[in-house]
Image (tube, grey):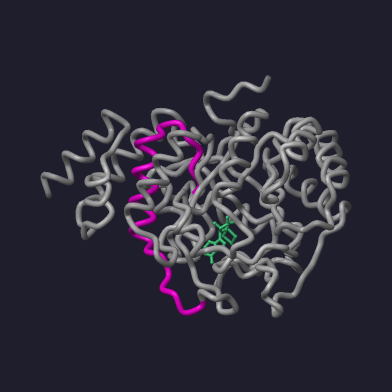
């Protein structure tokens, strides 16, 4: 085995830190020694999570979006996207089904859709928390004011997912139109953290123009933010976006980055994402074996799933909630892990 690879992994595990040069070495190597890195990451995950995998039921409740990110299939500018919104009743019925099949977290995700006013969202959160007091509510609805985030938190929301996409402002401007800024995104994340949410940031691996240097900056940013969750998956081109001809991100590099993040942030919640499962039929299992500890089965009504297409080829768009649940539980068990019964909060998280 390559001695430099081994020594970088050993030191990363000991110090929870990595230099830019060493990161480049791990990310750019040929992958033949991956297993050494993955085993180290798996060991750390096992120390804190004991082979438990947390499931989060994902409810994609609207694909309307006022933004126009160049990579995303539901960008406002994509006139081919067939738009839909779920009613409050429909969303509550997803939670009902979700609780029956054992989920303790509901992730409410949408494009940035102004139709859902703060009032609608707070009402919804209150209704979900009343009907399912043992469950966590995670929001993933984009950039909002501090005031709105505070209202949602006061209504009972527990967690918030908002990927920063890239910490480098120049790279950010290559992925987004001028109306959006990386600085604003970071401000939102710090606001969320200060309010008291468990916060998730994250990036795609292999977006156009992404360099190893950018990924290093992402790590520096994450060290500053200290997120509770980090969502990463490969970039996958969508045919009706400006990035339609761009190459997909590498699964192998995504797995290595997952493992590196597990070693830097031992207790962080790290999903094996749907994008990873789309890019590779065994991608989610490989993610867990590289240190991930969360999966996000789709809980959206099956008649809208094909419309929430962030990228081409997305898996699980033909299945029902119960099917994804059974499928994922099977996948988890076949690799020697098991699904947790708890809410799956961050190990250090204590709600005020
Ligand atoms: N490929 C992979 N992931 C994508 N996302 C959006 N578009 C794509 C794509 N084409 C990710 C973004 C966003 C999250 C909800 O989905 O990182 O934050
Ligand atoms: Fe949806 Fe496997 S997780 S079918």
Q: Quadrant for residue 157, please give it.
A: top right
For residue 68, side relative to residue 165 (left or right): right
| Rendered view: 200 above or below 314 | above
User: Count of labels shown?
Assistant: 0
- The residue lying at 42 percent from left, 51 percent from top is 287
What percent of the width, then of the height, locates residue 317?
Answer: 64, 67
- The residue lying at 21 percent from left, 57 percent from top is 29
Image: magenta residue range = 244-271
Q: Say if the magenta span includes residue 264.
A: yes
| Rendered view: 307 above or below 42 | below
Report if residue 218 is visible in the image.
yes
What percent of the width, then of the height, locates residue 3?
Answer: 11, 44
- The residue lying at 69 percent from left, 34 percent from top is 158
Viewer-proximal residue, 171 or 347? Answer: 171
Viewer-proximal residue, 267 or 116? Answer: 116
Q: Quadrant for residue 171, please give it.
A: bottom left
- The residue lying at 65 percent from left, 37 percent from top is 159
Viewer-proximal residue, 335 or 45? Answer: 45
| Rendered view: 105 above or below 194 | below
| Rendered view: 251 above or below 15 | below
Q: Say if the magenta span includes residue 47.
A: no
Which quadrant of the frame does ligand 1 lie within?
Answer: bottom right
What percent of the width, then of the height, locates residue 124?
Answer: 84, 44
Report if residue 341 is visible in the image.
no
What percent of the width, then of the height, locates residue 284?
Answer: 46, 55
For residue 310, side relative to residue 252 (left or right): right
Viewport quadrant of the C terminus = top right
Viewer-proximal residue, 280 or 269? Answer: 269
């Amino acid at each position: 085995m390559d001695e430099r690879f081994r020594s970088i992994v050993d030191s990363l595990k000991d110090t929870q830190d990595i230099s830019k040069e060493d990161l480049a070495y791990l990310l750019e190597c040929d992958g033949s020694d991956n297993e050494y890195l993955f085993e180290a990451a798996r060991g750390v995950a096992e120390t804190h999570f004991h082979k438990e995998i947390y499931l989060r039921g994902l409810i994609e409740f609207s694909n309307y979006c006022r933004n126009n990110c160049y990579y995303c299939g539901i960008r406002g500018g994509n006139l081919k996207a067939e738009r839909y919104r779920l009613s409050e009743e429909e969303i509550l019925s997803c939670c009902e089904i979700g609780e029956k099949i054992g989920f303790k977290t509901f992730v409410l995700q949408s494009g940035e859709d102004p139709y859902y006013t703060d009032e609608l969202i707070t009402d919804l959160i209150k209704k979900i928390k009343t009907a399912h007091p043992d469950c966590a509510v995670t929001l993933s609805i984009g950039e909002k004011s501090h005031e709105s985030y505070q209202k949602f938190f006061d209504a009972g929301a527990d967690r918030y997912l908002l990927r920063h996409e890239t910490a480098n402002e120049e790279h950010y401007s290559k992925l987004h139109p001028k109306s959006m800024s990386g600085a604003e995104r970071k401000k939102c994340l710090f606001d969320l953290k200060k309010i008291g949410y468990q916060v998730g940031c994250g990036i795609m691996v292999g977006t156009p123009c992404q360099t190893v240097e950018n990924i290093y900056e992402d790590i520096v940013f994450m060290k500053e933010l200290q997120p509770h969750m980090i969502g990463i998956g490969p970039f996958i081109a969508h045919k009706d976006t400006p990035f339609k001809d761009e190459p997909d991100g590498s699964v192998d590099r995504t797995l290595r980055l997952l493992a590196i993040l597990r070693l830097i942030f031992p207790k962080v919640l790290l999903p094996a994402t749907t994008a990873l499962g789309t890019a590779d039929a065994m991608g989610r299992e490989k993610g867990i074996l590289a240190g991930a500890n969360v999966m996000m089965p789709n809980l959206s009504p099956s008649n809208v799933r094909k419309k929430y297409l962030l990228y081409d080829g997305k898996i699980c768009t033909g299945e029902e909630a119960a099917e994804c649940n059974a499928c994922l539980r099977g996948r988890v068990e076949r690799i020697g892990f098991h699904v947790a019964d708890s809410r799956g909060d961050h190990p250090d998280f204590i709600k005020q």
